[in-house]
Amino acid sequence: MENRVPAHMRGQILDVDDYSTNLAHLARNGLRGVSFTGGEPTLNPDLPALVARAANIFDRVELTSNGRFFREMLPALAPHLDVLKISLDAVDPVVRSITQGTDAELDRAVGSIFAGCAAGLRVGVNVVVMRSTVDHINGVIELVRALNAKGLPGTAYVSLLDFYYSEERRAVWQEEFFPIEELATRFTARYGPSEAQDRFGCRFFWFDADGVQVRFKDSQGATHRAPKCRGCHRYCQEGIYGLKHSAEGWVTTCPTGDPMFGFHLAPGLGADEADRRIASLLRDIQFAHPDPHSFATMLETHGLTLGTGERKPLAVIG
Ligand code: SF4
């Protein structure tokens, strides 16, 4: 949510009590789970307190991190988490130079995956699929296989995500976007059919990669298009599927910060008014449906063309 809130409220961070009150407002209106993401949520020193409070409010609590301060926070976080997700782009050093990760970042991420499993957590290893790294995903699977073979109380799986488009990384996206369906076809040929799972209005596919669970998110069908999105010229690759709550209390269905899609769940707002505003956003979600043409619409709206993969990977960004 960083920089995705209206400018006038950026940086006005809620304290733990006000944040927790907002989570309770959301839960009272039917939300059953919360996922702490970023930016990097471990940069917020209040995170352990917020996660502990959230665990008393929601059925399911997830955390996505690049591991920066995760290991220091782990003892306080682990008892309250259902799922931990750690971002890891690739393990091959050449690929890491492309994705601009450093050895220290890689060590931190791998150390956090290990620490999460050692603490008994289910750990999803998030990998963004890119054209120049797609052939190295097997390295991540082997890393997870080796980790799971250690017999730790928790287990890890691989979660493959598409490379989200944003205006700032337009050129890189055009060269690097790799259709995740194409990768799924390769997996089907190698590992057999997947199992489909519908969650949060999105469809996921689970493969058994010789004992390692690998999850694909359906990149094209998962994008929801609410009636409110019609005519949107920013046409995101995310769409309306859940509520986002920023550290400032900005609640929205849209990743842009457009006031038309959200409201400020400000400290002191009464329960009735909070319920009325939340209900309005939940109706937007209710009327949003996956649109099989949404990806094509996004390409058309932004005038995007996809890379051919003919250029050598290191020449793309390296
Ligand atoms: S959620 Fe809808 S309105 Fe917001 S950026 Fe995405 S497509 Fe546009």
Image (tube, rainbow, N blue to C red):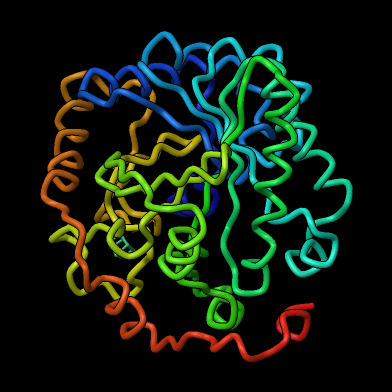
Specify the quarter for ligand 1: bottom left
Q: Residue at x 40, y 66 (%)?
A: 181
Which residue is outermost to the right? 103
Q: Residue at x 36, y 57 (%)?
A: 218
Q: Quadrant of residue 58?
A: top left
Residue 159 location, x and y as percent?
A: 53, 46
Instruction: Please indicate whether residue 197 sits to the left or right of residue 112 in the image.
Output: left
Q: Quadrant of residue 56?
A: top left
Q: Give whichever of 84, 180 is nearer the camera.
A: 180
Q: Nearer the viewer, residue 188 or 89?
A: 188
Q: How many marks?
A: 0
User: In the picture shown, does residue 90 fall above or below 174?
Assistant: above
- Vertical comparison of 282 with 266: above or below: below
Tell me: residue 118, above or below residue 176. above
Q: Is residue 109 left or right of residue 278?
A: right
Q: Is residue 315 above or below residue 285?
A: below
Q: What residue is at 30 percent from the left and 49 percent from the top? A: 203
Using the rendered image of the protein, determine whether residue 77 is visible from the camera's viewpoint: no
Residue 311 visible in rendering: yes
> Camera-side residue: 41 or 215?
215
Locate residue 260, reporting x and y percent: 24, 55
- The residue drawn where x is 38% and y is 64% is 237
Q: Position of residue 312 (x, y in %)?
A: 72, 86
Quadrant of the image containing the C terminus? bottom right
Residue 303 x, y percent position in the rendering:
39, 89
Is residue 196 shown left or right of residue 86?
Answer: left
